[in-house]
Image (cartoon, rainbow, N blue to C red):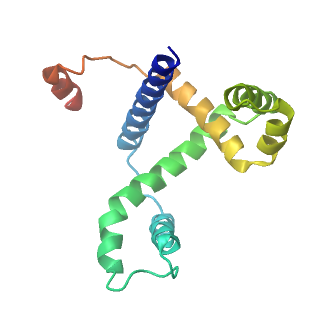
Amino acid sequence: MQIKKDLQKYYDEQSEKHVVNALTNEIVRRHEFTAPQTLVKGIIDSYVDEIKREQPNKELPKGFDLTRYSESVRPSALWQAKWMLIREQIIAKEKITAEEADVEKLAEEGAARFNMEKERLLEYYKKSESTNEKIVSDKLAAILRQHAVIKEIAADDPSKLAELEHA
């Protein structure tokens, strides 16, 4: 029975991620503006730094074509830059923050899930910037969902999917 619950939870989480990704993609698509090139370059540089970190000698692999790679990831970096700027504006406008009660709730849920002491987890979460980021992101996703018109379609009906893609 636990396996069934775990699988359902996994698929629910994946579905939610898909919805949030679709919402963010649509928001970025609807907001045409030129992102600062320094921001786009910074994002590309962070992609390159990640490749370096994954290498044993912390350098780009021999023969790595930095120019070609940069050009290939530019659309992704441009999207990322636009979403980053739009996201900041929404968070500021909606006054989204991670409150202490949010951190406590997360610690309570985590303690039950990981079979840990709530206080120990709470102490860790209070020091973690990623915890605040998760709370803010979750609140932002809830606001986006609240203001979105979402149409569910059957996964086995490709004609409906084609209609939505052209809407």
The total of numbered circles placed on residues is 0
Q: Residue 47 versus residue 141: which sits nearer the camera? A: 47
Residue drawn where x is 75% and y is 48% of the image:
128
Instruction: Identify the residue at horizontal 48%, vertical 82% (top origin).
Output: 59
Residue 111, compared with residue 34, is above or below; it is: above
Toward which corner of the image does residue 111 lie, by quadrant?
A: top right
- When the figure is inspected, residue 34 is found, relative to residue 135, above or below; the finding is below
Q: Residue 127: image x %, image y %?
A: 80, 48
- From the viewer's perspective, is residue 167 above or below residue 52? above
| Residue 119, x across and y down, in percent | 86, 34
Q: Position of residue 56 (x, y in %)?
A: 50, 78
**Residue drawn at the location 59% of the way across and 37% of the way down:** 137
Quadrant position of the C terminus in the picture = top left
The residue sitting at 82% across, 32% down in the picture is: 117
How far from the left and from the top, in percent, is residue 38?
Answer: 50, 69
Q: Residue furthest bottom?
A: 62
Q: Residue furthest top?
A: 1
Does 61 appear above or below 95? below
| Side (left or right) of 126 relative to 78 | right
Q: Left or right? Give the position of 35 relative to 124.
A: left
Q: In this rendered view, identify the residue nearer to me: 164 or 123.
A: 123
